[in-house]
Amino acid sequence: MMRLEETEYIIVGAGSAGCVLADRLSADGQNRVVLLEYGGSDRSIFIQMPAPLAYPMNTKRWNWGYESEPEPHLNGRRLNCPRGKGLGGSSSINGLVYVRGNALDFERWKDEEGARGWGYADVLPYFKRAEGRAEGGNEYRGGDGPLSTSYGSLKNPLHQAWLDAAQQAGYALSEDYNGYRQEGFGRMDMTVRDGTRCSAAKAYLYPARKRANLRIIQQALATRILFEGQRAVGIEYERGGQVYQLRATREVILSGGPINSVQLLKLSGVGPAEELRQHGIDIVANRPGVGANLQDHLEFYFQMACTQPITLYGKANLLGKAMVGAQWLFLRSGEGASNQFESCGFIRSRAGIRYPDIQYHFFPMAINYDGSSLASEHGFQAHVGPMRSKSRGMVTLRSANPQDAPRILFNYLSHPDDWADMRACVRLTREIFQQEAFAPFRGREIQPGAECVTDEQIDAFIADHVESALHPSCTCKMGDPADPMAVVDPELRVIGVEGLRIVDSSVMPSITTGNLNAPTIMIGEKGADHILGKPLLAPSNAPYYVAPNWETAQR
């Protein structure tokens, strides 16, 4: 056993929130901060180049490689649950999409879920502080923050067809879904800077790592939180076959994400008492909410054949990839400099829904998100799925061995309302693709297929084809300390112990409307001020859009 010197703060996990914390907590040059990360470097063309996003997502070097338990409502399928491993965490292997969520997500956190101080007015200033928008800042957007965001060129004519078709179907355009109005169709934001991925590592960690008071330890597997009584005082970790202990004089902060933070808490005696006893783990604090409330977004790919050779399929061969790669290497431009998710949409599934509960990513190619299945022809697709599933899953220990991956059961589509939402996704998307704007490009419906029309047929398609949108969250939910299922209080302190916080997407009380990288970084920004005891940024007075006819009309 080797004992290292004390430090003020220990951060476990160099992902989206952990990188933010490493920067903000060390910024004054006074606090000694140690950042522990199990993975290694993110310096690879496959991470830094936006286009080949499927490669790092499917590479063991950068991905923990989790999968769900057999999902009972998806014909027993196991679904992939990628989690970033290495500097930047999941922000280094994600789809580079920047979606803050809807303003009403955060109002729900504040008003219904016990997360006081996390309403839209409270969180908007932290979104702005994080962001360096290429188009500049305004009342809603940040112009000089570390995290770069930008729009794609919309060069492929299929993107314009998508936006035109949406209008023809009766939907409005949104100038900026991260601004006043999320609802509608428009350009999609990406975390790209000068043609390269702007991960949390690039945005926050690279500028901070030169500080003498910040130490980054890689290839370090955190195995246990060290407690003295009810107070967290350090971390035990394994590295290179050796076991080390590191002590924190101020706080231990978990930023391992919705899977790994749960596992470490439980291994350390914080979690449901009965589960811990089953694995012979001494109980420090009985918190039944640890690992419960697991949420995610499901999606499927609505694919159409394209009658014109204008899709990315023409670049999918060896020569095409070489040309794209060369242009990116020498110029940081071309198809390689974009994630190709350059247009999108947020709609309501039916009348009576107050704000969007369906999200679209449009993509000018027919291919699986992970790159595992490419259509044998030119095609295009919309990734579509509901945003507020009522199903809930859980993360539980497989054993008391930190090397054993935990059990992950999302329990997808266990609530009947979720099936109705999926059917709406199929029918509403088909309607958009049948609009006149797609007439010059529209071939056959590859999937679900024109014959898939009845509820029973759609349900069968969904059970066989739906995939995770890769947004696990909410497993250590924030809430009122009096709530027995809350894990952290609104200052992100773990309830029932001292000296321990969680700052990552696991603390979301409920999942937000859209991709999760942006709100996770916001949680890191706001969490840093809570940890340092700084005055919180002044709330914003910026208004937000709610459809005036939402009670009576779907669009």
Image: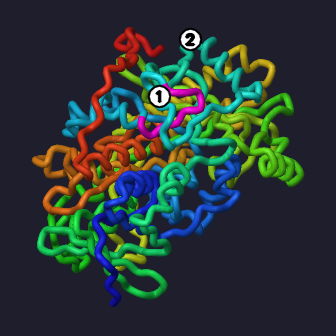
- Give coordinates of residue 528: x percent, y percent: 32, 49
Was residue 134 drawn as part of the magenta stretch in this picture? yes
143 or 344: nearer the eye? 143
Question: Most extreme residue toward the right, as rendered?
Answer: 319
Q: Position of 461 compared to 294: left or right?
A: right
Amino acid type at image mark 1: Arg
| Magenta segment boundaries in residue numbering | 129-137
- Give coordinates of residue 540: x percent, y percent: 32, 25
Q: Position of 504 compared to 37: left or right?
A: left
Mark 1 highlights which residue? Answer: 141
* Residues at discs 2 and 1 in contact (Cβ within 8 Å): no
Rendered view: 271 above or below 323: below
Question: What residue is drawn where x is 37% and y is 48%?
Answer: 524
Residue 22 numbered mark, or none: none
Q: Position of 32 compared to 517: left or right?
A: left
Mark 2 highlights which residue? Answer: 170
Amino acid type at image mark 2: Gly
255 or 467: nearer the eye? 255
- Give coordinates of residue 115: x percent, y percent: 22, 39
Choose top left, top right, bottom left or bottom right for residue 352. Answer: top left
* Crowd tier of the residue under label 1, counting other residues whose Cα lies within 10 Å: few below 14, some 14–19, many 20 or above: many
